[in-house]
Amino acid sequence: MGAGTRRSAAARWKVRAGLVGVVALALPLAGCGLKSGSPMVDDVVPGSVGRGKPLDGASLTVTSKNFSENIVLGQMIGLIFKAAGAEVLDRTNLPGSISAREAIVKGGADAMYEYTGTGWITYLGHAKPIADPLKQWQAVRDEDRKNGVTWLPQSTLNNTYALAISRKNNAKYHLKTLSDVAALSKKNPSAVTICVENEFASRDDGLPGMEKAYGMSLPAANIKKMDAGIIYTQVSKSNSCLLGEVYTTDGRIKAMDLEVLVDDKHFFPNYNAAPVIHTKTFDKYPQIAGLLDPLSMKLTTEVAQELNAKVDVEGQDPHAVAKDWLIREGFIENKKG
């Protein structure tokens, strides 16, 4: 999308939802399912969830978008279903948001993790996000029922935009919030340099809107545009950018010793992850809620950073990352000899 192109907020956030995969580095995901699907063959048994095999006899399909975090979350659902007795078909790693959404709506897949902001803005077409995370989830849940989609309770995992600073540089400035950045920009305009993607730099719901919301005006020379992956390195290892645009759950935040600043005026939409289930499937197997609610309660932004780093920084397989974490947390167990 060109810098001069004007679109509705909903259309712009459709682009954001489709591009959210830039969070992940491009990795071969051979074990994570093809479009046609592949059976999940793990020999796992219930841990803290799935006791009594409540899905015994069920045949369920899990899906996800094609970026690391969402693939890991899709694998978690599949593994819990498998431990609870279901036969599971793995259709994770579908291209973009729309194909995974259509699979849930039309019943080509039964379950995945979706993001409340994507649901509210991209799928349901609302231009303005709801600032309160719970109220946004409730609004999405209620409105999406007509589309045959059931939203289970959300996690606190919030994959949205943010600005970050290196811990080393923040020792000098002690920034905690975007309001702190605004105050610094007025006190010392030359200090606030920022690295952003081209699109984020030009949209009303990106940098210009953020500046307006926080009452700051950054000189054009202080704004440096670059690819998303380079931003993390520039903020961490150079002095060319004091601040950088990041995604809050990106594994490189901790790996590169960055601190995320609080959006204290709630400018950026909430993208809380929540399980979405094809409603006919949920009507048939309402016990799915008892399996996935405890999982969502454990999923935080910090957990996502940790798991994303294992995939995007260390190069581990998303399925193995999901399985190891579920076993570590006691949700499932490997079947003993």
Image: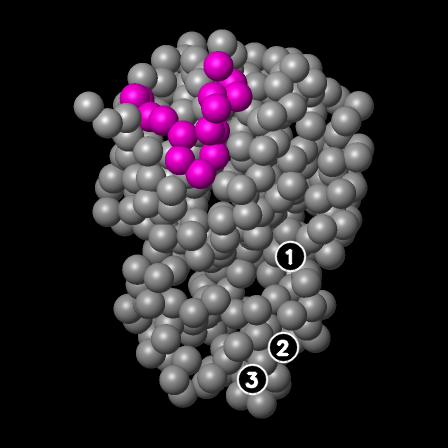
Q: Residues within 10 Å of mark 3 (few under 14, many from 20)?
A: some
As displayed, is residue 92 above or below residue 1?
above
Of the residues under marks 3 and 2, which one precedes in the sequence? 2
Q: Residue furthest left?
A: 337
Between 281 and 24, which is closer to the camera in this rendering?
Answer: 281
User: Is 162 situated left or right of 117 in this image?
Assistant: left
Q: Give the image location of residue 288, x and y in percent.
A: 58, 27
Residue 283 sits in which quadrant? top right
- As helix, strand or loop, the secondary structure at mark 2 comes to helix
According to the picture, the residue beneath numbered tag 1 turns out to be 268
According to the picture, the residue beneath numbered tag 3 turns out to be 184
Main SS class of the magenta portion in the image: loop
According to the picture, the residue beneath numbered tag 2 turns out to be 179
At a point 60% along the width and 25% down the height, the residue shown is: 287
Of the residues under marks 1 and 3, which one precedes in the sequence? 3
Of the residues under marks 1 and 2, which one precedes in the sequence? 2
Q: Residue furthest bottom?
A: 187
Q: Is residue 313 visible?
A: yes
Q: Give the image location of residue 299, x and y in percent.
A: 49, 48
As for residue 200 lying within the magenta part, the answer is no
For the record, the magenta segment spans 42-56
Q: Amino acid at mark 2?
A: Ser
